Amino acid sequence: MGAGGGIAKVAAPALIQEVAHPRLRPMLASCYYPFFYFGSLLSALLCFAGLYIPGGWLWRMPSMIQVLGPSLVLATLINCPESPRWLVYKNRLAEACDVLSKHHANGVVDDPLVQWELAEIQATIEEERFRSQPSYLNFLKTVGNRKRLVVIH
């Protein structure tokens, strides 16, 4: 719910894609959104069922039940690995290699798949560093852009 829900909807599938074994990526990625909508439907049904509960439990019961899902996610988050891409971005290559080897090669650090994925992540991050990052300040840098911004406003 709220901003946290939006962040989770973007971050969770990305982490699944990074950590899942290449053979399982399509299946696991395609399971994320159906489970999200199943949970949303279940939540809506619980709220609807709460309409028929007499007294002060009208709103309490759905709220209490809806706390269970996020609580389960928070409890399992402790076992969730760091993103290999984030680790490489922070120059923690050994840890990134450990995460990739644990999930993609049964702990074998010298596995060709692990080395290839690590090299691919490094190349992508280097390419992103050389590219200029777009910014909202670009709207204000030139006179023409400032005039267009005023016209739109």
Image (cartoon, rainbow, N blue to C red):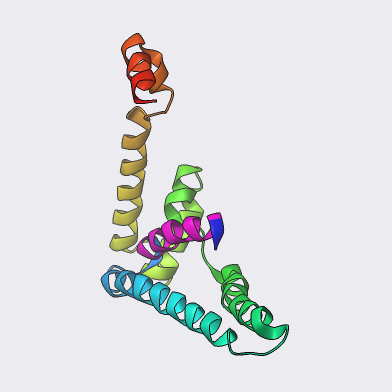
Taking the magenta stretch, the answer to whether it contains residue 118 is no
Q: Quadrant of the C terminus?
A: top left
Taking depth in this image into account, of 70 and 51 the one nearest to the observer is 51
Instruction: Determine the residue located farthest toward the top in the rendered image.
Output: 143
Q: Which residues are magenta?
A: 3-17
Residue beneath the point at 41% across and 62% down: 100
Taking depth in this image into account, of 113 and 23 the one nearest to the observer is 23
Question: Left or right of 107: which side holds 17?
Answer: left
Q: Position of residue 49 (x, y in %)?
A: 54, 87
* Residue 15 visible within the image: yes
Q: Is residue 143 above or below residue 106?
A: above
Question: Left or right of 49: which side holds 39?
Answer: left
Question: Left or right of 72: which side holds 89?
Answer: left
Taking depth in this image into account, of 33 and 1 the one nearest to the observer is 1
Residue beneath the point at 34% across and 25% down: 152
* Residue 109 visible within the image: no
Residue beneath the point at 49% across and 43% down: 91
Residue beneath the point at 53% across and 67% down: 80
Q: Quadrant of the N terminus?
A: bottom right
Image mark count: 0
| Magenta-drawn stretch, dominant element (helix, strand or loop) | helix
Q: Position of residue 27 (x, y in %)?
A: 28, 75
Q: Is residue 84 above or below residue 76?
A: above
Quadrant in which residue 67 is drawn: bottom right
Q: Position of residue 136 (x, y in %)?
A: 42, 28
Taking depth in this image into account, of 145 and 24 the one nearest to the observer is 145
Q: Is residue 22 above or below residue 54?
A: above
Q: Position of residue 34 (x, y in %)?
A: 35, 75
Taking the magenta stretch, the answer to whether it contains residue 16 is yes
